[in-house]
Image (tube, rainbow, N blue to C red):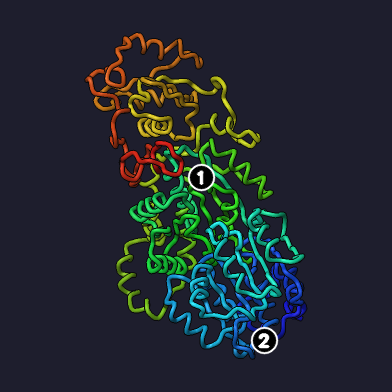
Amino acid sequence: MNPFIQLGIRHDIVNAISELGFENPTPIQEQSIPVLLTGSNDFVGLAQTGTGKTAAFGLPLLELLDFEENHPQALILCPTRELCLQITNDLKNYAKNMRNVHVVAVYGGASISDQLHQIRRGVQIVVATPGRMLDIINRKAIDFSKVGYVVLDEADEMLNMGFQEDIDSILSTTPDEKKTWLFSATMPSEVRRIAKKYMTDPFELTMGTKNTGNENIEHEYYIVRARDKYAAFKRIVDFNPEIFGIVFCRTKIETQEIAESLIKDGYNADSLHGDLSQQQRDKVMKRYRERSLQLLIATDVAARGIDVNDVTHVINYSLPDEIENYTHRSGRTARAGKTGVSISIINGKELGKIRQIEKTLGKRFVKVEIPTGFDVVEKQLFALVHKVHNVAVNEQQIEQYIPRIMDEFKELSKEDIIKRFASLEFNRFLDYYKNAPDLNAPVDESRRMDSAGTGDRSSRSGMRSDFTRLFINLGSVDGFSRGDLLGYICNTAKISGRTVGKIDVKGVYSFFEVPNEDSEKVMTGFKGADFQGREVRIELSGDGGNESRGGASNYKRREGGDRREGGFRRDGGGSSGGRREGGNRETSSAPGGGGGFRDFSGKRREDRAGGERRRRF
């Protein structure tokens, strides 16, 4: 016997949902449907998005309502247009074998006259967003005096969006004896207050621990330098060739900038934020649902209520201000029992926030290393091979071209053809990631910031015996940060960023560590090197980490400490690189940039979300 029939759902509804792929009830459906079918309780259900809440309340409603009567009997309130349409379509699909079931979607951004016309023709279930519903009530165009059931779906989201007063006004037009069913992913105090205000001794059902995350979601985080965030983000995307994801940003400006940069870099991406018109928003969402977009870049507010199947990854480009928002973000993936990954790209100072989220969700996050350029190239190559192996061949259509194709390849062996075909993609990524630097945050920073002891890199308080400490006559006044210097060293000496150890950037000089076996290679690689017309010198430090000895001390004495124009006066006299605005060594994220990625425009920008001046990536 079908499990849904055992829960009390009748055959014509079960047949409809079976065609939709419903085989076994989800935990929230299994626990809530028998309770709601009695129609005698107020109800509070706490469960993550994507766990099947629509069927959990929709199927009982179809059983309880009298569809011979053409007046509103059930009102479902939800936060967004997308969710409103989704619930409406789902209910219509569940009821396709039933007679005289009328469901109307009431939401802003569409013709109110069309919605009023549907209401006048007769409706039993109204699915609405609070703002438009209140408009229709104020026009006295609907009568809720016979409503028996009110469903508040995604209640926490509606309160976050400021719908408290609208909800109060709407519910005041419904009978006191109605039953109220409240569903929420989290249970903040505001939602608890709604439950107390509008419910009498509700039946409470919590799937898992309150505010916990979906068990099918893997949570990962990457620690990077702030200026490397965009480059690291792109590398993560490239390492997942089949990604179909939502990328969350904190501000509308950041959302737009990242989307524009991704588009310029050849990715199928677009943005979703509050400044878009409803028509623009619909166009973006249509492309995303049709999968002509691979990445949707969105703010928390814009992404509320999005329900798209098979989202593989959620990427937190910026962590949310509220932990509850992390729960909603990650809930966009792993829906309907599937699995997904939630990725956070953070700097070392944000590790404490990760620990807070872990504690709230009751789930351990996994620290992952940013893949190397070689890792990405290898992953992309075999993704292409896999795609070629599984492509469907239209024998009838391609047959007419086979003779010409075979003639073109007649001088090539099977092995040559395979090599050349694979190289179409392989060469592009190989060139792009040639000499790609290590984008993981410095070893000592990651270890020091990880107070929970989960850092998996060894901390170095002093010189390691297997490393050589080198001096270089470049520093912060030349515009170098640790990441910039790492990229410069790797490009000049032709070594991997993973081999470089601790980097100490000072004012007019710096120190860095390389494995003993690479020290001669590095010094040889820098012979004849210059930076802005000035000779670059590499020397053995010989100080074991003590700046008062060796190269640094000698360099200070040689320079004489003549401090002018924001830096030391050098051979050739030019002002220090630290004063240049937009004078980047690499001005874009174009392929071949092994020394790190700069910001989108080459200018400094104000980070409105963080309130501090920093380079935006």
Query: What residue appears at the point 34 percent right and 61 percent down from the top-left corner?
Result: 412
The answer to which quarter of the image holds residue 573 is: top left
Q: What element does badge 2 sit on?
A: loop
Across and down, in percent, residue 157 comes to: 57, 60
Disc 1 marks a residue whose amino acid type is Ile
Disc 2 marks a residue whose amino acid type is Asp
Across and down, in percent, residue 337 comes to: 64, 65
The answer to which quarter of the image holds residue 50 is: bottom right
**Label 1, on which residue?**
345
What crowding class fits label 2: few (fewer than 14 Cα within 10 Å), some (14-19), or many (20 or more)? some
The answer to whether marks 1 and 2 mark residues whose Cβ atoms lie closer than 8 Å is: no
- Residue located farthest toward the left when viewing the structure as drawn: 572
Query: What residue appears at the point 51 percent right and 78 percent down from the top-left corner?
Result: 140
Query: What residue appears at the point 47 percent right and 68 percent down from the top-left corner?
Result: 289
Up the image or down, 126 lies above or below 31; here it is below
**Label 2, on which residue?**
66
Can residue 553 be seen here? yes
Up the image or down, 449 lies above or below 32; here it is above
